[in-house]
Amino acid sequence: ITVENGLDQATTVHWHGIDLNNRMDGVPGYTQPAIAPGERFTYEFTAYPAGTRFYHTHGSHHGDEAVQLDRGLAGALVVLPRDYQAPDIDVSWVLTERIQHGLFPINGAVYPETEFIRVNTGDRVRVRLINAGSATVNPMHLHGHQFRVVSTDGNPVPLAAQLTRNTLPVLPGETYDIEFVADNPGLW
């Protein structure tokens, strides 16, 4: 992955949940020099292990990093296993925060501009919850349905250990995959 820094400040990209070489970890001053404005850096790694992973920028200091996260410089990195059995609907929600403004975006949008999940009755739905923020716990709640927690931090939860819930607090840096069957029609 080649990153070209178009910001007016130095940055790197840090990867959560990927087992990679230390030089590719994206922590400026420790695992690599920060990428200066206008410069490029190529991250080389095998996307392993499978699961819901994510990335975010690391500025050259905490102030830069906070500004970059406020700008939404984070995203999902989903590594599918070879034997993946796709659900009918598979969506990722990257949760971030703009604490100074009291905003908590999902995929960069704030309600009511957030996108709906459009499903049909009987659809198996997987939602990948990724808290890419650094300070806020996001209590994610599903209306009109119950869900199973099928993965934590990108790692599968064995069927016997899966919890059925309707609210799940997602701490900073955590990921959860939840699944449900859309069996209660309506706009939820």
Image (tube, rainbow, N blue to C red):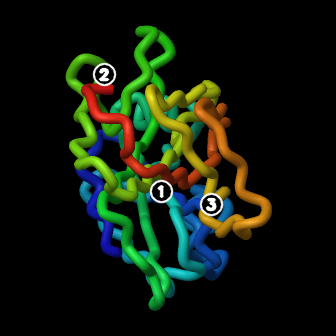
Of callouts 3 and 1, the N-terminal one: 1
Q: Residue furthest bottom?
A: 82
Q: Does residue 33 appear in this view? A: no
Disc 1 residue type?
Answer: Tyr
Q: Is residue 18 left or right of residue 91?
A: right
Of callouts 1 and 2, the N-terminal one: 1
Label 1: state its secondary structure: strand
Q: Which numbered circle lies on residue 110? A: 2
Q: Is residue 9 left or right of residue 81?
A: left
Instruction: Please report the residue visible at 48 percent of the width from the left and 50 percent of the height from the top.
Output: 180
Q: CA distance from mark 1 to mark 2?
A: 20 Å
Name the front one of labels 3 and 1.
3
Q: Position of residue 99 (x, y in %)?
A: 50, 16
Q: Residue furthest right?
A: 161
Q: Position of residue 80 (x, y in %)?
A: 44, 78
Label 3: state its secondary structure: strand
Circle 3 residue:
151
Circle 1 residue:
55
Q: Position of residue 18 (x, y in %)?
A: 59, 72
Instruction: Please report the residue visible at 29 percent of the width from the left and 34 percent of the height from the top.
Output: 185
Disc 2 residue type?
Answer: Val
Label 2: state its secondary structure: loop
Disc 3 residue type?
Answer: Ser
Name the front one of labels 2 and 3.
3
Instruction: Please report the residue visible at 21 percent of the width from the left and 23 percent of the height from the top.
Output: 113
Of callouts 2 and 3, the N-terminal one: 2
Compared to residue 113, the image places residue 39 above or below, namely below
Q: Residues within 10 Å of mark 2 (few under 14, many from 20)?
A: few
Q: What is the quadrant of the N terminus in the image?
A: bottom left
Instruction: Please report the residue visible at 54 percent of the width from the left and 30 percent of the height from the top.
Output: 140
